[in-house]
Image (cartoon, helix red, strand yellow):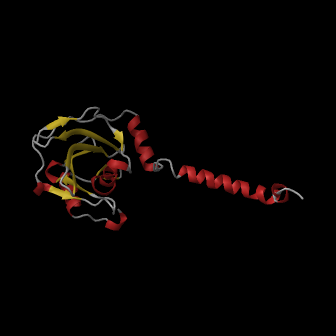
Amino acid sequence: MRPFFARHAQRLAALAPLAALALIAGCSSMSQPVQDFDEYIAQQEAAKGKWKEAEYALPTTPPQDADLVSFPTLPNATLDYAIDTKSVQVTDDGVVRYIAVIRSKQGARNVSYEGIHCSSFESRLYATARPDGTWIPARNSEWRPIRPYGSTAYQGILYRDYLCQDKTPAGNAKAIVQGLRFPTTNPTYR
């Protein structure tokens, strides 16, 4: 009697490429999300060194709850993400700076002063706020690519839906705040 593999060698040879493809597909889905082409081009432009960041100053006061506007993130998000509308600034260097407030249902609160550079798809943490309202400059404050996953996924949503359009700021500070208060995109898209 012939062994199993010898009897079915022709069938197994036909299935081998499909098995290899399934293995590759399974492994690739476990890696980090693929960067989209626009993000790649924007990062390449930023890497050319033509851009210089404008001067900025850290906030002097903490955000007030009345000035916060929440924005939707993921459907199953357990945190509330908000922007201090009085802190939004748009500068000539293409950076939108703002104070982000992330709140839990239990009352925990993280407050940070951040910026998004629209043409390079990058973000920067400038400072974080203490509970007493004072600000601490961030260590290792540098421009980093926005990651559409993890703890900073909200920055990708801000970039895409509120702060930037066609790799430039989505208008002046007033227009951006208006867009945060009255979004024009479909919430199910987020």
In the displayed orientation, state which residue is furthest to the right: 1
User: Residue 181's quadrant in the figure?
Assistant: bottom left
What residue is shown at x 40% (from left), y 44% (from top)? 42
Image mark count? 0
Quarter the C terminus occupies: bottom left
User: Residue 9, how many percent across, how many down?
Assistant: 82, 56
In the displayed orientation, state which residue is furthest to the front: 1
Q: Is residue 100 visible?
A: yes
User: Residue 4, how many percent across, how many down?
Assistant: 81, 58
User: Residue 147, how many percent across, how many down?
Assistant: 38, 47
Q: Is residue 186 visible?
A: no
What residue is shown at x 43% (from left), y 49% (from top)? 38
User: Residue 87, how many percent across, how many down?
Assistant: 16, 48
Quarter the N terminus occupies: bottom right
User: Residue 162's quadrant in the figure?
Assistant: bottom left
Residue 57 versus residue 176 in the image, above or below: above
In the figure, is residue 17 to the left or right of 131?
A: right
Compare residues 8 and 80 and report the one nearer the observer.
8
Residue 53 versus residue 179 in the image, above or below: above
In the figure, is residue 119 to the left or right of 134?
A: right
In the figure, is residue 62 to the left or right of 145?
A: left
User: Residue 180's quadrant in the figure?
Assistant: bottom left
